[in-house]
Image (cartoon, helix red, strand yellow):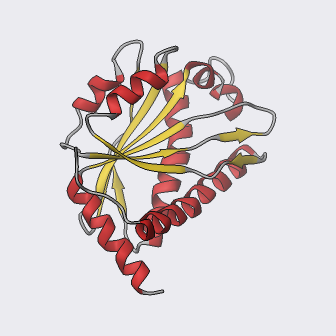
C-alpha cells in the first residue's frame, strides 16, 4: 500500500482548485452546446494502483464503456494521464448532444471532440491556478468491448502509484449525459503537487 497521503488542508485546497477548474470546463461545454450544464461538486480520493483495476471492474462490469485517455505533463514535475470514461448509452448519445448528423463523424471522433473540451479546459484551468503550463499527448480511444480497461492501465508510459480519482457528473439540459474522469498520477508527481499545495496554503 502506498504511504503517500494528503493532509486535510492539502485535500481541501486541492478540492477548491478542482471545483474552480470543473466550473470552467462546465461553462465552456455549456457555451459550446448553447444550453445549460449542471455540475455536481466533484469528489476526489487517492486510490492505490492495485485497487483501481478492481474498482473499474466493479463499476463498469454490467455494460460496455468507452474510454478516452490523454497524457499530460508540465513544469515542476507534474504529469499524469487523464481518463474520461463513458458508458455505452452516453457514448451513443454524443452525436445528438453535439448536433452532429448520424453519419457525419465516427463515434471515435465524437468522443475525442467532447473529451477535448472537458479534459483540456479542466487541466488548463487547474494548471493556471498553480502557475503551471501543460502539454498533451494525442488522445486515444479504448473500448472495453475490445480491450479490458485494466489492460490499458498496465500499458501507460509511466509506473503510477496512486490514482487521483475525480468523480464528475454532468447534466446537460434536454439530455441525460454523464461521464467519469480519473486522473492517474505517479507518486513523485503527487509529491510535487503537495509542494505546490503547501505553497498556496502558506500564502494564506
Image quadrant holding the N terminus, namely top left
- Could one spot residue 106 in this view of the protein? no
Is residue 159 left or right of 97 when viewed as pictured?
left
Residue visible at 35% across and 24% down in the picture: 149
Q: Residue at x 48, y 69 (%)?
A: 13
Viewer-proximal residue, 72 or 170? 170
The answer to whether residue 183 is above or below residue 180 is below
Please provide percent x and percent y for residue 32: 68, 47
Q: Write down the quadrant of residue 141 in the picture.
A: top left
Q: Position of residue 189 (x, y in %)?
A: 25, 59
Looking at the image, residue 40 sits to the left or right of residue 72; the answer is: right
What is the x, y in percent for residue 180?
A: 52, 37
Q: Position of residue 48 (x, y in %)?
A: 29, 42
Task: Say how many tags the image has.
Answer: 0
The residue at the point 29 percent across, 27 percent down is 152
Q: Is residue 81 visible?
A: yes
Residue 116 versus residue 24: which sits nearer the camera?
24
- Taking the view exactly as shown, the residue that stands out farthest to the right is 174
| Residue at the farthest bottom position | 203
Residue at the (78%, 45%) spot, across then down: 35
From the viewer's perspective, tell me whether residue 59 is left or right of residue 54: right
Residue 182 versus residue 176 in the image, above or below: below
Amino acid at each position: 500500500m502506498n504511504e503517500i497521503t494528503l493532509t486535510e488542508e492539502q485535500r481541501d485546497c486541492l478540492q477548491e482548485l478542482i471545483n474552480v477548474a470543473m466550473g470552467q470546463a462546465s461553462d465552456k461545454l455549456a457555451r459550446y452546446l448553447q444550453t445549460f450544464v449542471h455540475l455536481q461538486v466533484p469528489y476526489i480520493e487517492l486510490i492505490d494502483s492495485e485497487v483501481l483495476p478492481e474498482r473499474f471492474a466493479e463499476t463498469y462490469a454490467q455494460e460496455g464503456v468507452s474510454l478516452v485517455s490523454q497524457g499530460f505533463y508540465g513544469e515542476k514535475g507534474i504529469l499524469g494521464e487523464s481518463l474520461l470514461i463513458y458508458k455505452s448509452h452516453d457514448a451513443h448519445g454524443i452525436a445528438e448532444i453535439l448536433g452532429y448528423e448520424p453519419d457525419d463523424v465516427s463515434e471515435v471522433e465524437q468522443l475525442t471532440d467532447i473529451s477535448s473540451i472537458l479534459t483540456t479546459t479542466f487541466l488548463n484551468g487547474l494548471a493556471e491556478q498553480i502557475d503551471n503550463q501543460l502539454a498533451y499527448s494525442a488522445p486515444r480511444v479504448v473500448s472495453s468491448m475490445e480491450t479490458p480497461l485494466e489492460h490499458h492501465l498496465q500499458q501507460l508510459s509511466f509506473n503510477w502509484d496512486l490514482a487521483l480519482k475525480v468523480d464528475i457528473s454532468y447534466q446537460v439540459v434536454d439530455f441525460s449525459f454523464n461521464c467519469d474522469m480519473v486522473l492517474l498520477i505517479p507518486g513523485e508527481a503527487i509529491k510535487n503537487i503537495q509542494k505546490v499545495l503547501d505553497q498556496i496554503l502558506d500564502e494564506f
